[in-house]
Amino acid sequence: PLILIRQLSLLKKRLIEDGSGVDSENKSLIKRGRIQGRQFEGDTIARVGSRDVKVSIILWGYSFSEPVWTSVLDVLMSLPAEVAFTCGWKAGLNEVLEVYLKLLYTHIKILHMESNIERICEKF
């Protein structure tokens, strides 16, 4: 358990990358196994200089790999309470859980796609 606690910052970083849809080298993540939210507000026209360009607004958390997120929750829930709430809290467990809340907020309040996160909600 202590080895996992030491890696919480890396775990948080990987979850944020997964929710953004790109890896650390800005390469798009593979779509297989990813949950896709519906496009928010459709395409938008933006003015760049004197030209109009069509842009798609994609929010963080719009797509994510559900197996990754549920597996991380399974691992975190297997931690003994003494470790999770003493060492874990000091090492950033609250920051990892905050990333989960951001994902839930995106799908429930912004995209209105609660069905996308049913399995993650079951873990909470």
Image (tube, rainbow, N blue to C red):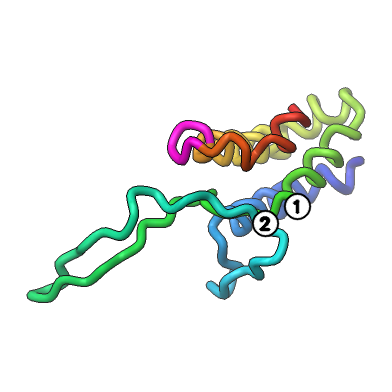
- Vertical relation: 2 (above or below) 29: above
Q: Which residues are magenta?
A: 108-112
- Vertical relation: 66 (above or below) 121: below
Per the image, label 1 sits on a secondary structure element best described as helix
Q: Where is residue 95 drawn, in percent x and y?
A: 63, 38
Residue that mark 2 sits on: 14
Q: Quadrant of residue 58?
A: bottom left
Q: Quadrant of residue 78?
A: top right
| Quadrant, the N terminus | top right
Q: Where is residue 94 drawn, in percent x and y?
A: 66, 32
Mark nearest the camera among 2 and 1 is: 1
Residue that mark 1 sits on: 68
Asked if disc 2 and disc 1 are in contact, CB closer than 8 Å, the reply is yes
Per the image, label 2 sits on a secondary structure element best described as helix
Which one is earlier in the sequence, the residue at label 2 or at label 1? 2
Is residue 8 left or right of 103 when viewed as pictured? right
Task: Find out whether residue 59 is within the magenta segment.
Answer: no
- The residue at 15%/67% (across/down) is 47
- Vertical relation: 8 (above or below) 58: above
Q: Where is residue 13 drawn, in percent x and y?
A: 64, 54
Q: What residue occupies the far left of the structure in this picture?
A: 50
Q: Main secondary structure of the magenta part?
A: helix
Q: Residues within 10 Å of mark 1 (few under 14, many from 20)?
A: some
- The residue at 63%/53% (across/down) is 35
Amino acid under disc 2: Arg
CA gap between label 2 and label 1 equals 10 Å
Is residue 114 left or right of 32 when viewed as pictured? left
- The residue at 43%/53% (across/down) is 39
- The residue at 57%/41% (across/down) is 103
Q: Where is residue 12 drawn, in percent x and y?
A: 66, 49
Amino acid under disc 1: Val
